[in-house]
Image: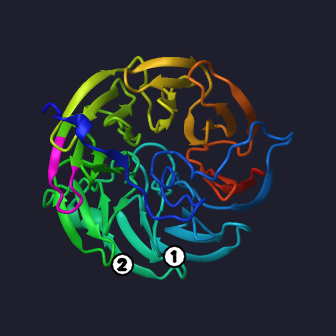
Amino acid sequence: MKVAVRLSALLVAVATLPARAGDWPQLLGPARDGRAAADERLPDAFPAGGPRRAWQRAIGPGYGGIVVAAGRAFVFHRVADAERLEALDAGTGESLWSLDHPTSFAPQVGGNTGPLCTPVVAGDRVITFGAQGVLSCADVATGKRLWQVETHRTFGAQEGYFGAGSTPLVIGQRVVVNVGGTRRDAGLVAFALADGAVAWSKTAEPAGYSAPVGVTVAGQPHVVAVTRYKCLLLDPADGTVRWEFAFGQRGPTVNAATPVVLPGNLLLVTASYGIGSVGARFDGAGVARVWDGIDGLATQYCTPVAVGDHVYAFDGREDGPPGTLVCLDPATGRRAWSVPDVGYGHVIAAGDKVLAVTNDGETLVIAADPQAPRVLGRTRVLDAAVRAPPALAGGRLYLRNDSQVVALELGL
């Protein structure tokens, strides 16, 4: 592994998609880091009976989260033998348009037949990536399909245990996807946002479920991606791999949490299945491991969210004993505190608070305080199989499971 040089000379920051204040245009929010826009707030407590429901409507199965942009809430779900992207009025839940493509997907493991990936809104375009590798681009206002690529067929990729599950990254005029193709070195492929043409394909890496993230290194955009067996830094212009290190292992394992890039050129990647976490310092020339192990954090698919100089996450697995809520120092890999037997799910943050949503539908607001765990409020909104990440936009909290999507007025 190449040792990083002159780390302090480089600025590393999470790349963001252009978005209006209060939007949640992609997986994990405006900067793909789990943090809501600066004008969003979380309550100190929930009212008796829970937050007011602005609207609720029936949907089909899927694990992708809701995204919100330009007054629309987008949901990607399965209806009969089709994967459907649907645009809803963010204030009322009224359906504005829908766009289907056929699917015959059935997972190797588990019973969920819906798409796994969260849509991505970039300007006037919205991108989806279906469970069978169908990459589509539609017009935000009308739902007109602008282009589509059957990536599994084109590049010889496998569906994997649960289907394609790595949400694409729009960075500049590129759509970067962890395709996992076996033809044309198509582990990672970049498509032109304008028309879906292949800009480049690199590596022979099988696909993981982790979504790539954008970073700025020495003033230039780059992509950090976790595949089935590696973590890599790539140049989105031509796919040049700046560095890579081994992460993951063979067998029935999954890399699903999105990499977390923190101030001071610090990278955190994490997985369960005995893989654990790695904290590393990096620049454009190399990467140096600072710590690793399974004791601090080993999370199945929960992406940690940073508030201040600590991160917050669920440790453990959905298909294991109840998970532990953890506050971790990412510089050392040591826990500041932990709360066992909470369950498992997703976390996001706004201001100095963390919102945690468990698989059984419990929603908690937690003070982002490394000194001690403090649950400020809790409520239960949806029941059973809440596996999609939440979204916080325009003062509303959006949650979904396999049959319902709900928008909650936080009143802040």
For residue 134, above or below residue 27: below
Queried whether the magenta region covers residue 315, the answer comes back as no
Judged from the image, the secondary structure of the residue bearing numbered disc 2 is strand
Tell me if residue 390 comes above or below residue 80 in the rendering. above
Please count the marks in the image.
Answer: 2
**Is 5 left, or right, of 272 in this rendering?**
left
In terms of sequence position, does the residue under pointer 1 or pointer 2 come before the other?
A: 1
Q: Is residue 282 visible?
A: no
Name the residue at 36% across, 66% down.
134
Residue 236 position within the rendered picture, expressed as x and y whole percent measured from the top left: 24, 59
| Residue labelled with disc 2 | 147
Amino acid marked by disc 2:
Trp
Q: How far across and down, in percent of the image, does residue 131 sit?
A: 41, 58
Give the magenta range.
Answer: 234-243
Circle 1 residue = 140
- Which residue is at a point 20% across and 47% down the rendered structure image? 205
In the orientation shown, which residue stands out farthest toward the front?
9
Please tell me which residue is depicted at 24% across the width and 27% down the height of the picture: 289
- Which mark is drawn over residue 251? none
